[in-house]
Image (cartoon, rainbow, N blue to C red):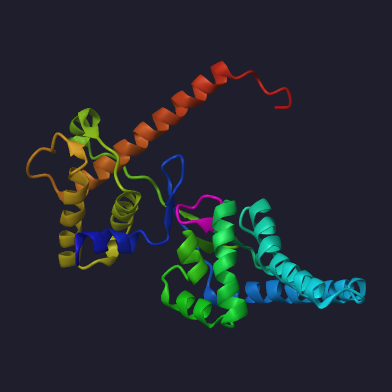
Amino acid sequence: MSVDGGYRSYAGDDLVTGEGVFVEVPVASVPSRMASRAIDLLITAILAIVGFLTFGVLTARSSEAVATAVSIVLTVGLTVILPVIFETLTRGRSPGKYALGLVTVRDDGGPITLRHSAIRQLVGFVEFYLLGGSPAIIAAFIHPRAKRLGDMAAGTYVMSLRHKFQVTAPPEVPPALEHWVRAADIGPMPASLSIGTRQFLTRTGGLTQQSRQHLGQDLCAQVLQHVSPPPPPGVHAEWILRAVLAERRRRDLDRLQSEAIRTHRLMPPDPLG
């Protein structure tokens, strides 16, 4: 198992909150996504029927060119523009997602923007309306986060809001390493490495002894590339990982608290608070 593949395999469905707490994100299943899309397509079909009937009556005496232009505008509006506006304003929801408790988020867990939604809907037009949805279904079954092609292009995925988040307890610094890690310079680490390390520490009981030792040493080597000075010699790799993660969380909490105090001093109190 490669080092990169090792920690990325653990990082697939996890996020880190602003307080440094790791949560396992429930990715929406393919059947729920298909049901959500079916609801959206049904609503789009109803709006299209009403729209074309209405514009058909209004443009009955118009030229063929006007009727064609109206049809193109109505088609693009219902299949791309309206979904983009709705999804952007609701931060990743659609009528179908509302019904099934789903939401589209960025790969880092943040709310999507107009750009993300526009890319998803433009690719989705090809996936669903030109190719019948087969590319989206195949991609969703293959991808570990059930992403369709539009999600891959936009850097998004769909998560379920009807599952409880599983919050794992933060690690604690082993007493033998407290002096070292408090004085160490810990630089920024890739989010995938941080999450993968956390997941490794929470799932060591399910690993074989050989895999646990090999993956722990590989992760430790990766983590220590961002830490200076190195730890005392002879310390177990898992102790080092716990110490570094715990210290990073402590520093993040201190930073957030300092920012909150500074904001409170600079900003006037909210009269509606």
Whether 106 is among the magenta residues is: yes
Q: Residue at x 40, y 48 (%)?
A: 169
Instruction: Give the residue drawn at x 55%, y 16%.
Output: 265
Which residue is more in the foreground, 115 or 181? 115
The picture quadrant where one finds residue 152 is bottom left
Q: Quadrant of residue 121?
A: bottom right
Confirm whether the magenta stretch covers residue 81. no
Picture coordinates of residue 170, whole percent (x, y) = 37, 45
Quick check: 41 above or below 241?
Answer: below
Residue displayed at 30% across by 36% down: 247
For the magenta stretch, what is the residue range?
A: 105-111
| Above or below, 174 relative to 147 | above
Name the foreground residue: 13 vs 172. Answer: 13
In the image: residue 140, left or right of residue 200? right
Q: State whether residue 22 appears in this view.
A: yes
State whether residue 247 is above or below residue 23.
above
Identify the main secondary structure in magenta. Answer: loop
Picture coordinates of residue 270 (x, y %)?
Answer: 68, 23
- Residue 54 left/right relative to 160: right
> Horizontal and vertical percent for residue 77?
72, 65
| Residue pictured at 60% horizontal, 77% vertical | 128
**Relative horizontal placement of residue 117, taking residue 99 as reference (left or right):** left
